[in-house]
Amino acid sequence: MPMAAAVLSLPKKPLPAGRPRDWYVAHNRRLKTMRLVIALLDSGVYDPAQAGNRRIRDTADRIGVHPPSDITCRMVRALLQYGR
């Protein structure tokens, strides 16, 4: 009988205070991008051409994150390309 993969989450730490709002927006966008890329790779999507906005947004829905913006979708494809 196969064992289910355990999900290990690290304890969350507060973000540093005093940064400009744009820094927090960019930071959270990068985190979401990485989560989406990992989920896409796990589902067998390795090529940026396979990762259209619809597929990325469906993946976001599947893993339980808010739908990504067009900018985040572009970042996902760029990260997939960079990893090749």
Image: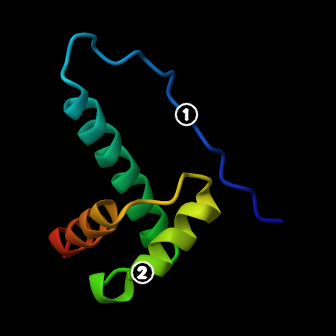
Can the viewer see residue 42? Answer: no
Name which residue lies at 25% across and 27% down.
Answer: 21
Q: Farthest bottom residue?
A: 49
Residue 4 appears at what percent x and percent y? 73, 56
Nearer to us in this view, 67 or 60: 67
Q: Which mark is residue 18?
A: none
* As drawn, 4 above or below 7: below
Element on which disc 2 rests: loop
Residue 61 picture quarter: bottom right
Quadrant housing the C terminus: bottom left
Quadrant housing the N terminus: bottom right
Residue 50 picture quarter: bottom left
Q: Name the kind of residue labelled 2 in the image.
A: Val
Nearer to us in this view, 82 or 1: 82
Q: Which mark is residue 45?
A: 2
Q: Name the kind of residue labelled 1 in the image.
A: Ser
Name which residue lies at 55% across and 34% down.
Answer: 9
Q: Farthest right residue?
A: 1
Residue 10 appears at what percent x and percent y? 50, 28
Name which residue lies at 60% across and 58% down.
Answer: 63
CA–CA distance in space, label 2 to label 1? 24 Å
Residue 25 picture quarter: top left
The answer to whether residue 35 is left or right of residue 75 is: right
* Residue that mark 1 sits on: 9
Q: Farthest top residue?
A: 17
Q: Are marks 2 and 1 in contact (CB under 8 Å)?
A: no
* As drawn, 16 above or below 62: above
Local crowd at mark 1 within 10 Å, few (<14), some, or many (≥20)?
A: few
Name which residue lies at 54% across and 53% down.
Answer: 66
Element on which disc 1 rests: loop
